[in-house]
Image (spheres, grey):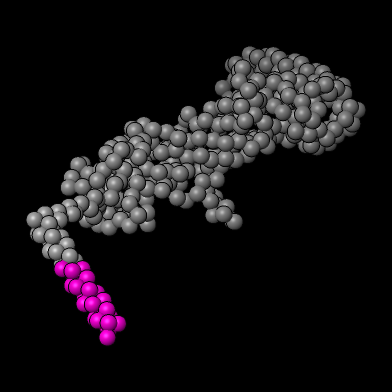
């Protein structure tokens, strides 16, 4: 009986504890609710999205002189085959008359044995003296005949010896011509260099008997040389008016000046490129202190081309699919179809846009779109200024 009472008291005490715990929890929840209502949470501030940053530079149109970088092989402008106009035996050769030798204009290169031609000259001199004497004789006889027939009303030309005098005069002229020919033949036993020349080859020797016109060797004119350079069709519109002086020709440390003179009138069978000629005066520097260039040498040439008006010169990477990106005065992106006039190495020349207040975008965001609002940062780079040359 007592045991049952104890159990009943224990259960009543446990229920009271639970009721008290629920009351405490309810009170705590009420307090928290009151505090929350008294201090509502502050709303988070939403930051506005920033436009993407770009780099830009002002549009600076300028007049730009184009340039062409060409190259080719230096060739002789003139070559002459050496030959005597007369037959004979080679009696003397200049020591400089060897392959690779250089001689100046008027230098005696070779000489024929002149004995036969000197003999002919003496013979023609004698014939001339006889012709003069014969003419004098006929003139004297004609003078006598004129006096003898002075009283005769009818006299013939034969009686006055006019035909004989005319024949003697003709004989004298023939003798003079033959003497001049003999003198000319004697002078032709000497061969002089017709210009400053390089001996390209020699095909004769001392004591050799030759025929008239037989080749003795070959001379190359050193007065000037010609650099033949190929020019692509897309470069030809930018060539200056010919002839164009002031062309810079170079090879390693050598610098010379030439003149772009003409088009050869032919196109290459393989490349279809046109060939032009650059003239270089005194290539072997015989009459100057400049450094020589040699025939067969590969040379580079820089030609100042035509001047393009109102253009932009920009790096190749700024042009995407033949399009330039610009930024207008409202800081929005604009696509401009690039009218590419010429490409020079890593740059392009473009007709300048008509928008003076626009900026040229030098560094784009990842996904550019027409009309996109952007903000400008520091300039990425600058455009080439007027007169900029490569």
Placement of 290 over or under 65, stated as above or below: above
Q: Residue furthest bottom?
A: 1
Where residue 41 appears, as percent x and y from the top left, is 15, 56
Residue 281 figure quarter: top right
Q: Residue furthest front?
A: 1
Q: Is 373 left or right of 244, judged from the image as shown?
A: left
| Dominant secondary-structure state across the stretch colored magenta | helix
Q: Residue at x 39, y 33 (%)?
A: 388
Q: Residue at x 22, y 73 (%)?
A: 13
Where residue 247 appears, as percent x and y from the top left, is 50, 31
Q: Residue at x 8, y 56 (%)?
A: 38
Query: What quarter of the picture does the C terminus occupy?
Result: top left
Where residue 340 appears, as percent x and y from the top left, is 36, 50
| Foreground residue among 148 and 52 | 52
Look at the image and give the residue range highlighted in magenta.
Answer: 1-23
| Foreground residue among 299 and 295 | 299
Q: Residue furthest left?
A: 38
Residue 239 figure quarter: top left
The answer to whether residue 131 of the structure is visible from this angle is: no
Q: Residue at x 35, y 54 (%)?
A: 366
Query: What quarter of the picture does the N terminus occupy?
Result: bottom left
| Foreground residue among 360 and 124 | 360
The answer to whether residue 87 of the structure is visible from this angle is: yes
Placement of 205 over or under 71, stated as above or below: above
């Amino acid at each position: 009986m007592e045991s049952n009472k104890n159990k009943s008291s224990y259960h009543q005490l446990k229920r009271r504890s639970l009721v008290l715990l629920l009351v405490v929890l309810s009170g705590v929840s009420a307090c928290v609710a009151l505090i929350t209502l008294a201090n509502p949470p502050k709303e988070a501030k939403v930051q506005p999205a920033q436009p993407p940053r770009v780099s830009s530079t002002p549009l600076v149109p300028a007049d730009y002189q184009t340039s062409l970088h060409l190259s080719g092989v230096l060739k002789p402008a003139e070559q002459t085959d050496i030959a005597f106009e007369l037959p004979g035996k080679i009696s003397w050769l200049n020591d400089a008359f060897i392959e690779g030798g250089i001689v100046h204009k008027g230098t005696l290169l070779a000489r024929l044995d002149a004995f036969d031609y000197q003999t002919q000259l003496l013979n023609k001199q004698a014939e001339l003296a006889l012709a003069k004497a014969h003419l004098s004789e006929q003139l004297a006889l004609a003078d006598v005949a004129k006096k003898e027939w002075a009283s005769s009303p009818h006299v013939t030309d034969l009686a006055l010896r006019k035909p004989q005098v005319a024949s003697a005069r003709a004989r004298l002229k023939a003798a003079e011509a033959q003497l001049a020919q003999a003198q000319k033949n004697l002078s032709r036993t000497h061969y002089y260099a017709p210009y400053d020349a390089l001996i390209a080859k020699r095909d004769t020797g001392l004591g050799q008997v030759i025929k008239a016109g037989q080749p003795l060797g070959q001379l190359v004119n050193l007065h000037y040389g010609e650099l033949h350079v190929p020019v692509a069709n897309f470069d030809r519109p930018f060539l200056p008016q010919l002839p164009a002086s002031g062309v810079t020709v170079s090879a390693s440390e050598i610098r010379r000046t030439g003149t772009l003179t003409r088009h050869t009138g032919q196109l290459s069978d393989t490349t279809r490129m046109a060939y032009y000629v650059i003239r270089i005066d005194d290539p072997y520097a015989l009459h100057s202190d400049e450094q020589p260039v040699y025939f067969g040498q590969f040379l580079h040439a820089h030609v100042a081309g035509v001047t393009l008006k109102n253009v932009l010169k920009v790096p190749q990477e700024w042009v995407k699919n033949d399009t330039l990106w610009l930024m207008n005065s409202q800081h929005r992106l604009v696509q401009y179809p690039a009218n590419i006039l010429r490409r020079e190495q890593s740059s392009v020349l473009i007709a300048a846009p008509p928008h003076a207040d626009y900026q040229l975008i030098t560094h784009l965001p990842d996904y550019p779109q027409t009309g996109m609002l952007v903000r400008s940062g520091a300039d990425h780079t600058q455009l080439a200024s007027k007169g900029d040359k490569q």
